[in-house]
Image: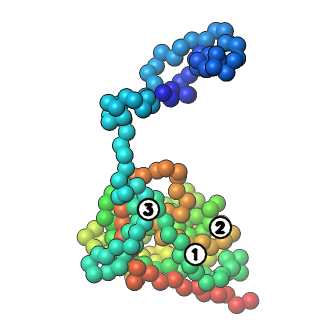
């Protein structure tokens, strides 16, 4: 039965220690006080009523992941929650000035706040995020709107990254850019570096046939 650890003081922790002192052949501690708060979760496997009340067994569709599906006669990649799929790109060198671009089209299917793609590296990523009816380019604490997404169909986007710049646009719209300092160029569809065990309930589809990558090598 886990307790709310941050709410426990030293006397409470001594009381918890004393519950196992005899079993471990250790002396009990003085000045121990039982916590007054209720346990955060009761984990007695024999308590069927608590199990039914406190636990939700996930289905295959309720957790993050990716799979190939067919939508409107198109083969699509469906990404749930903070799932991601790596994109294979040609050799490139950001420090030399090489440019990497990614084009694709997507459709929001459920929820809000989908990370559509991630470029850069772990320490300095840039992300395209669909939120509040718009597509946002986000990096280094800066968010810039690329414009409105198509709420009833497919939205084409393009993202390009090189040096200390990443730019993005919707369709034929004007690009916006943000500045960050990644050392490498990794490209992912979805959220490349998610927070552990976070399932916001979002889902979107990417038209596989519309995914295009390009590397422009800068000659010395």
Element on which disc 1 rests = strand
Ranked by sequence position, the earlier of labels 2 and 1 is 1
Q: CA distance from mark 1 to mark 3?
A: 26 Å
Q: Residues within 10 Å of mark 3 (few under 14, many from 20)?
A: some
Secondary structure of the residue carrying tag 2 is loop
Question: How much space separates mark 2 and mark 1, taking CA atoms?
Answer: 10 Å
* Distance (Cα) linking label 3 and label 2: 26 Å
Instruction: Between label 1 and label 3, give the one nearer the viewer.
Output: 3
- Residue placed at 37% from the left, 39% from the top? 55
Q: Quadrant of residue 62?
A: bottom left
> Tag 3's secondary structure?
strand
Numbered badge on residue 161: 1
Residue 41, horizontal then vertical, whole percent: 44, 30
Evaluate if marks 2 and 1 touch, with contact meaning CB atoms under 8 Å apart: yes
Residue at 31% x, 60% y is 110
Furthest-bottom residue in this view: 219
- Residue 182's label in the rendered image is 2
- Indicate the quadrant where residue 126 lies: bottom right
In terms of depth relative to the viewer, which is nearer, 145 or 72?
A: 72
């Amino acid at each position: 039965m886990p307790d709310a650890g941050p709410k426990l003081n030293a006397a409470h922790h001594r009381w918890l220690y004393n519950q196992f002192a005899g079993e471990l052949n250790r002396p009990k501690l003085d000045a121990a006080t039982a916590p007054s708060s209720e346990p955060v979760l009761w984990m007695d496997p024999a308590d069927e009523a608590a199990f039914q009340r406190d636990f939700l067994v996930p289905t295959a569709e309720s957790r993050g992941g990716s799979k190939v599906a067919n939508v409107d006669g198109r083969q699509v990649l469906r990404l749930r929650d903070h799932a991601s799929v790596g994109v294979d790109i040609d050799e490139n060198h950001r420090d030399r000035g090489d440019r990497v671009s990614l084009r694709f089209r997507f459709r929001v299917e459920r929820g809000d706040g989908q990370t559509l793609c991630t470029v850069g590296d772990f320490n300095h990523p840039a992300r395209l995020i669909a939120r509040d009816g718009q597509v946002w380019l986000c990096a280094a604490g800066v968010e810039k709107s690329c414009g409105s997404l198509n709420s009833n169909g497919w939205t084409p986007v393009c993202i390009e990254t090189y040096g200390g710049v990443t730019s993005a646009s919707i369709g034929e719209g004007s690009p916006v850019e943000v500045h960050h300092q990644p050392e490498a160029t990794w490209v992912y569809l979805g959220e490349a570096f998610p927070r552990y065990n976070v399932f916001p309930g979002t889902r979107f589809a990417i038209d596989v046939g519309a995914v295009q990558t390009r590397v422009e090598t800068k000659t010395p």
